[in-house]
Image (cartoon, rainbow, N blue to C red):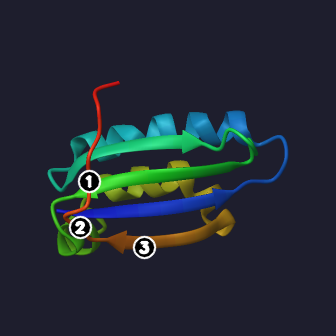
């Protein structure tokens, strides 16, 4: 498994439309056999900043499987207007350091 993080810094007044776009794009993620889970979080101190966290089966599953699949076109159509506002988009490997309590 690999985790992709995408950090966005949005223009003022676009947060609602951005949330709607990702709600639509999420349908494509749900249809992909390569996407294991995802979550979109908004910064509590700056509501124009978001982080999307996506768990993929692998980097190849994301880059070759999802991006070359039929559902990618719908995904990109939904979020395309926001691509220019990406500050970071990278894959990360999990380490052994982890913990947590149930929410």
**Image quarter hosting the N terminus:** bottom left
25 shown above or below 8 = above
Task: Name which residue lies at 58% across and 34% down.
Answer: 20
Label placed on residue 98:
1
Residue occupied by mark 2: 95
Mark 3 vs 1: CB contact within 8 A: no
Kindly state the secondary structure of the residue where label 3 is placed. Answer: strand
Q: CA distance from mark 3 to mark 1?
A: 20 Å
Q: Residue furthest right?
A: 12
Counting residues from the N terminus, which is met first, the one under dot 2 or under dot 3?
Answer: 3
Image height check: is 102 above or below 59? Answer: above
* For residue 5, side relative to residue 64 (left or right): right
Mark 1, Cα crowd under 10 Å, few <14 / some 14-19 / many 20+, is: few
Q: Residue at x 42, y 73 (%)?
A: 90
Report the disc number at residue 90.
3
Name the image quarter holding residue 82. bottom right
Indicate whether 29 appears above or below 81. Answer: above
Q: Position of residue 64 (x, y in %)?
A: 22, 74
Q: Quadrant of residue 96?
A: bottom left
**Crowd around label 2: few <14 · some 14–19 · many ≥20 (10 Å):** few
Task: Look at the numbered disc 2 and give the secondary structure of its residue.
Answer: loop
Gap in Å between the C-alphas at discs 1 and 2?
Answer: 7 Å
Whether tag 1 and tag 2 are in contact, CB under 8 A, the answer is: yes
Can residue 25 be seen in this snapshot?
no
5 or 101, nearer to the observer = 101
**Image side of residue 9 versus residue 32, left or right:** right
Q: Residue furthest top?
A: 103
Rendered position, 84 above or below 73: below
């Amino acid at each position: 498994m690999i985790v992709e993080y995408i950090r966005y810094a949005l223009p003022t007044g676009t947060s609602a439309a951005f949330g709607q776009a990702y709600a639509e794009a999420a349908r494509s993620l749900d249809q992909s056999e390569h996407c294991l889970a995802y979550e979109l979080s908004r910064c509590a101190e700056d509501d124009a900043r978001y982080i999307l966290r996506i768990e993929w089966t692998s980097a190849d599953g994301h880059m070759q499987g999802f991006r070359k699949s039929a559902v990618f076109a719908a995904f990109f159509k939904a979020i395309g207007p926001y691509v220019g506002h990406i500050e970071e988009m990278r894959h990360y490997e999990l380490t052994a350091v982890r913990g947590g309590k149930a929410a």
